[in-house]
Amino acid sequence: MAEAWRSIGGAGDLTANEERALVIKAKGGLGNRMLSAVTGCVLAELNGRTPYIDWRDGMYVPPGENLYPLLFDASWMGDLTAFDNATDVAPTPWSGHMDEQPVDIIRRDFPNGHRNPLLYRKLSIDLVGPDPSAKVGVFWSYLPKFKRLASRMAAHPGFSGRDIDQITSDLLDRFFRPVEEVRREVDRIFEGQSGPVIGVHIRFTDRKAPLPKIMRELERLASESPEAAIFLATDSAEAQDAVMSRFPATLTIDKALASDDTALHFSSEGFSDPITEARNALIDMMALARCDSLLHSRHSTFSVTAALLGRIPKARQVDVDRFNAKVAIKQFIQART
């Protein structure tokens, strides 16, 4: 895979007027935007463009500040702001508005389209058709779209013969290497841990995982592996209290927790140190990736991304929504539309 991505690895050596760029925008939580960005990186390779990750949409940090280099090594990436005034852009809604984000364009041009699952097609270059001639292309989707790229990937020497999970894990390694502060904190969590660790992720704010089912499965896993430690990543004080009351030795990090149903990245204006809280979210994800097994719900891309980062095999994952037909059907449709 390193050979296929050699040209992208040198992107920082190029200047804005020497290349054809694909600017990858974002909307949504950390897992969504990471997996969506991987889709964008695949599209960039398929179209011979250089990727730029633009997370200036105001998640955690103020609008206009790029969250991506605050969380990940961005030394591979050139100057994103060089395209802010570009007019040779596809799709056309972005022409002259490259410093804006999907939420800005949607609010202004498509005010009734916030929940339209196909709206991203108006704000992203075509995934399956020919690459537009514009010097700057934009990709954005709320969710990964690998299924729509599958036939093109199968014909590409860098991707053919490899499954989507393997490709995604490799690109997460390549483009989402955490900054030193995050890596250091993850190491600290596991310092002195010699036995297995059960990772548990519970999203319990705007999208609630089935907490009673998770607790039953955690009881079972703990009884089967009494020597195992437990690491908990959650956004909810209620969920953390539920786990800690039964397993008081559970490993956690000191961070802000929601006391209501508001997702933490939407509460960032109330943080005294938003960058620290953004990194705390990434620390949770990377710590889950280091665990030997993972208890979670596929309904949250946060934990799905952690499993891909850690290459945790399905056999060592307990997905409490694996038999949830509503979730499975929704994800099947989303991946293909």
Image: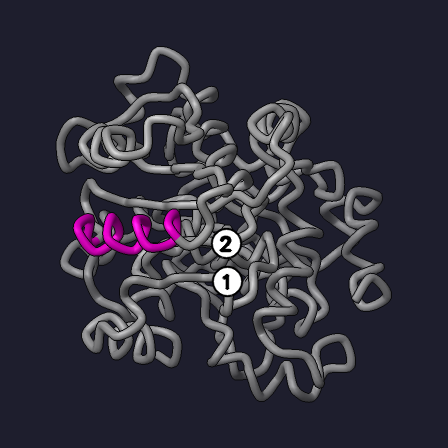
Q: Residue at x 38, y 29 (%)?
A: 60
Q: Position of residue 40 (x, y in %)?
A: 56, 62
| Amino acid type, callout 2 | Ser
Q: Residue shown at 65%/86% (left/top)?
A: 154
Q: Which mark is residue 196?
A: none
**Residue picked out by circle 2:** 293
Name the spot of residue 221 as percent of width and height, x first.
Answer: 38, 53
Does residue 55 appear in the picture of this structure? no
Q: Residue 80 appears in which quarter of the rendering?
A: top right
Residue 204, percent from left and from top: 22, 42
Amino acid tagged 1: Arg
Q: Earlier in the sequence, mark 2 or mark 1?
A: 2
**Horizontal side, residue 78 vs residue 143: left or right:** right
The reply to whether the C-beta atoms of the residues labelled 2 and 1 are less than 8 Å apart is yes
Q: What predominant SS class does the magenta segment belong to? A: helix
- Number of other residues with Cα within 10 Å of mark 2, as a class: few under 14, some 14 to 19, many 20 or more: many
Q: Is residue 13 magenta?
A: no
Residue 292 in the image, given as x and y percentages of width and height: 56, 51
Query: Is 21 left or right of 211, judged from the image as shown?
Result: right
Magenta highlight range: 210-223
The residue located at (29%, 29%) in the rendering is 244
From what the image shows, is residue 102 above or below residue 47? above
Q: Report the front residue among 81 and 29.
A: 29
Up the image or down, 191 lies above or below 329; here it is above
- Tag 2 secondary structure: strand
The answer to whether 174 appears left or right of 277 in the picture is: right
Q: CA distance from mark 2 to mark 1?
A: 5 Å
**Residue under numbered circle 1:** 316
Q: What residue sits 46% from the left and 50% below the top? A: 225
Residue 221 painted magenta? yes
